[in-house]
Amino acid sequence: MKIKEVIVVEGKNDTNKLKSYFDCDTIETHGTCLSDFTISLIKRLNETRGVIVFCDPDSPGDYIRNKLNEKIPGLKHAFILKEDGRTDKKVGIEHASKSVLEKALKNVVTYKETQSNISMEDMFELGLCGSSNSSAKRDIVSKKFNLGKANCKTLLKRINMLGLTINQIKEVL
Protein backbone atom coordinates (compact mmCIF):
# COMPACT_ATOMS: atom_id res chain seq x y z
CA MET A 1 0.00 0.00 0.00
CA LYS A 2 1.41 3.39 -1.03
CA ILE A 3 0.97 6.27 1.43
CA LYS A 4 1.07 9.67 -0.29
CA GLU A 5 1.40 11.70 2.91
CA VAL A 6 4.52 11.80 5.07
CA ILE A 7 3.97 9.98 8.36
CA VAL A 8 5.26 11.51 11.60
CA VAL A 9 6.38 8.83 14.07
CA GLU A 10 8.30 8.87 17.33
CA GLY A 11 11.33 6.76 16.47
CA LYS A 12 13.25 4.48 14.13
CA ASN A 13 11.44 1.32 15.27
CA ASP A 14 8.15 2.92 14.18
CA THR A 15 9.72 3.87 10.83
CA ASN A 16 11.11 0.36 10.30
CA LYS A 17 7.76 -1.25 11.13
CA LEU A 18 5.78 1.00 8.77
CA LYS A 19 8.32 0.67 5.94
CA SER A 20 8.24 -3.12 6.27
CA TYR A 21 4.54 -3.07 5.33
CA PHE A 22 3.96 0.13 3.35
CA ASP A 23 5.58 2.26 0.69
CA CYS A 24 5.87 5.43 2.78
CA ASP A 25 8.09 8.25 3.95
CA THR A 26 8.42 9.11 7.63
CA ILE A 27 9.79 11.80 9.89
CA GLU A 28 10.90 10.79 13.37
CA THR A 29 10.38 13.15 16.29
CA HIS A 30 12.90 11.22 18.45
CA GLY A 31 10.58 11.42 21.42
CA THR A 32 8.81 14.45 22.83
CA CYS A 33 11.59 16.93 22.07
CA LEU A 34 10.20 18.65 18.97
CA SER A 35 12.82 21.02 17.58
CA ASP A 36 11.92 24.16 15.67
CA PHE A 37 13.56 22.59 12.62
CA THR A 38 11.37 19.47 12.86
CA ILE A 39 8.20 21.52 13.31
CA SER A 40 9.16 23.73 10.35
CA LEU A 41 9.85 20.68 8.18
CA ILE A 42 6.54 19.06 9.11
CA LYS A 43 4.74 22.32 8.33
CA ARG A 44 6.34 22.55 4.86
CA LEU A 45 5.59 18.91 4.13
CA ASN A 46 1.98 19.35 5.22
CA GLU A 47 1.61 22.13 2.65
CA THR A 48 3.06 20.05 -0.17
CA ARG A 49 2.27 16.37 0.47
CA GLY A 50 0.15 16.25 3.59
CA VAL A 51 1.18 14.77 6.92
CA ILE A 52 -0.25 11.96 9.03
CA VAL A 53 0.65 12.08 12.72
CA PHE A 54 0.92 8.47 13.90
CA CYS A 55 2.19 8.46 17.48
CA ASP A 56 2.07 5.79 20.15
CA PRO A 57 -1.16 5.51 22.18
CA ASP A 58 0.45 6.81 25.38
CA SER A 59 1.14 10.10 27.17
CA PRO A 60 4.27 11.04 25.19
CA GLY A 61 2.42 10.27 21.95
CA ASP A 62 -0.48 12.48 23.01
CA TYR A 63 1.96 15.25 23.95
CA ILE A 64 3.58 15.15 20.49
CA ARG A 65 0.19 15.06 18.76
CA ASN A 66 -1.08 18.05 20.77
CA LYS A 67 2.11 20.06 20.29
CA LEU A 68 2.01 19.54 16.52
CA ASN A 69 -1.70 20.43 16.41
CA GLU A 70 -0.98 23.71 18.18
CA LYS A 71 1.72 24.65 15.68
CA ILE A 72 0.36 23.22 12.41
CA PRO A 73 -3.34 23.28 11.48
CA GLY A 74 -4.80 20.69 9.12
CA LEU A 75 -2.70 17.67 10.09
CA LYS A 76 -4.20 14.22 9.64
CA HIS A 77 -4.13 11.78 12.56
CA ALA A 78 -4.00 8.00 12.71
CA PHE A 79 -4.73 6.15 15.94
CA ILE A 80 -4.38 2.63 17.28
CA LEU A 81 -5.75 1.32 20.53
CA LYS A 82 -3.31 0.57 23.35
CA GLU A 83 -4.27 -3.09 23.35
CA ASP A 84 -3.46 -3.33 19.63
CA GLY A 85 0.09 -2.11 20.14
CA ARG A 86 1.06 -3.71 23.42
CA THR A 87 3.70 -6.21 24.47
CA ASP A 88 4.31 -7.42 28.01
CA LYS A 89 6.35 -4.33 28.85
CA LYS A 90 5.84 -1.73 26.11
CA VAL A 91 3.18 -0.03 24.03
CA GLY A 92 3.65 1.50 20.60
CA ILE A 93 2.87 1.36 16.92
CA GLU A 94 6.01 -0.71 16.34
CA HIS A 95 4.24 -3.57 18.19
CA ALA A 96 1.02 -3.45 16.14
CA SER A 97 0.12 -5.92 13.42
CA LYS A 98 -0.04 -5.03 9.74
CA SER A 99 -3.84 -5.18 9.72
CA VAL A 100 -4.09 -2.79 12.70
CA LEU A 101 -1.67 -0.33 11.09
CA GLU A 102 -3.44 -0.55 7.74
CA LYS A 103 -6.83 0.10 9.35
CA ALA A 104 -5.45 3.12 11.21
CA LEU A 105 -3.92 4.59 8.05
CA LYS A 106 -7.12 4.06 6.08
CA ASN A 107 -9.18 5.81 8.77
CA VAL A 108 -7.21 8.99 9.40
CA VAL A 109 -9.03 12.00 10.83
CA THR A 110 -8.39 15.70 10.27
CA TYR A 111 -9.22 18.20 12.96
CA LYS A 112 -11.09 21.28 11.76
CA GLU A 113 -10.22 24.83 12.71
CA THR A 114 -13.90 25.58 13.26
CA GLN A 115 -14.92 23.72 16.34
CA SER A 116 -18.32 22.43 17.36
CA ASN A 117 -19.81 23.60 20.60
CA ILE A 118 -20.14 20.43 22.61
CA SER A 119 -19.54 21.27 26.28
CA MET A 120 -18.38 19.30 29.27
CA GLU A 121 -21.98 19.43 30.49
CA ASP A 122 -23.03 17.69 27.25
CA MET A 123 -20.41 15.03 27.88
CA PHE A 124 -21.96 14.32 31.30
CA GLU A 125 -25.48 14.26 29.83
CA LEU A 126 -24.33 11.80 27.14
CA GLY A 127 -22.86 9.58 29.85
CA LEU A 128 -19.32 10.03 28.55
CA CYS A 129 -18.17 11.40 31.91
CA GLY A 130 -19.08 10.85 35.53
CA SER A 131 -20.80 7.46 35.46
CA SER A 132 -19.67 3.91 36.03
CA ASN A 133 -19.85 3.03 32.33
CA SER A 134 -18.41 6.30 30.96
CA SER A 135 -15.12 4.72 29.99
CA ALA A 136 -16.90 2.06 27.94
CA LYS A 137 -19.05 4.70 26.23
CA ARG A 138 -15.98 6.81 25.43
CA ASP A 139 -14.35 3.73 23.93
CA ILE A 140 -17.39 3.22 21.66
CA VAL A 141 -17.25 6.83 20.43
CA SER A 142 -13.46 6.73 20.06
CA LYS A 143 -13.56 3.54 18.00
CA LYS A 144 -16.39 4.76 15.75
CA PHE A 145 -14.64 8.04 14.90
CA ASN A 146 -11.05 6.67 15.10
CA LEU A 147 -10.04 9.04 17.89
CA GLY A 148 -7.85 6.79 19.99
CA LYS A 149 -8.34 6.00 23.66
CA ALA A 150 -9.13 9.16 25.60
CA ASN A 151 -10.24 10.42 28.96
CA CYS A 152 -13.27 12.72 29.11
CA LYS A 153 -11.42 16.01 28.64
CA THR A 154 -9.29 14.72 25.75
CA LEU A 155 -12.28 13.15 24.01
CA LEU A 156 -14.20 16.43 24.32
CA LYS A 157 -11.31 18.27 22.70
CA ARG A 158 -11.05 15.76 19.84
CA ILE A 159 -14.82 15.74 19.27
CA ASN A 160 -14.86 19.52 19.03
CA MET A 161 -11.81 19.65 16.77
CA LEU A 162 -13.51 17.21 14.40
CA GLY A 163 -16.69 19.27 14.44
CA LEU A 164 -18.88 16.36 15.52
CA THR A 165 -22.43 17.05 16.65
CA ILE A 166 -24.34 15.75 19.65
CA ASN A 167 -26.66 13.87 17.28
CA GLN A 168 -23.70 12.10 15.64
CA ILE A 169 -22.52 10.98 19.07
CA LYS A 170 -26.02 9.92 20.17
CA GLU A 171 -26.35 7.75 17.05
CA VAL A 172 -23.21 5.84 18.04
CA LEU A 173 -24.31 5.37 21.64
Image (spheres, rainbow, N blue to C red):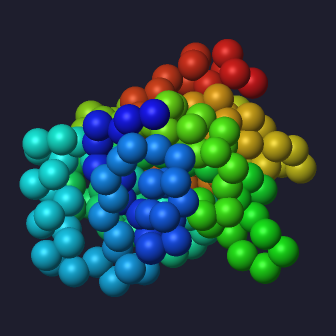
Q: Residue at x 64, y 29 (%)?
A: 144
Q: Residue at x 11, y 44 (%)?
A: 47
Q: In the rendered image of this protein, does residue 141 appear above or below residue 132?
A: above
In the visual, does 100 lie left or right of 49? right
Q: Residue at x 68, y 69 (%)?
A: 91
Quarter occupied by the N terminus: top left
In the visual, does 74 lie left or right of 143? left
In the displayed orientation, state which residue is furthest to the right.
132
Q: Residue at x 87, y 44 (%)?
A: 133
Q: In the rendered image of this protein, does residue 84 appear above or below residue 50?
A: below
Q: Could you say where residue 14 lies in the image, as x and y percent from the top left?
A: 50, 65
Q: Could you say where residue 75 lies in the image, as x and y percent from the top left?
A: 29, 46
Q: Would you say residue 122 is visible in this rendering?
A: no
Quarter occupied by the C terminus: top right
Name the foreground residue: 128 vs 13: 13
Name the foreground residue: 138 vs 109: 109
Q: In the rendered image of this protein, does residue 35 appear above or below residue 140?
A: below
In the visual, does 54 lie left or right of 4? right
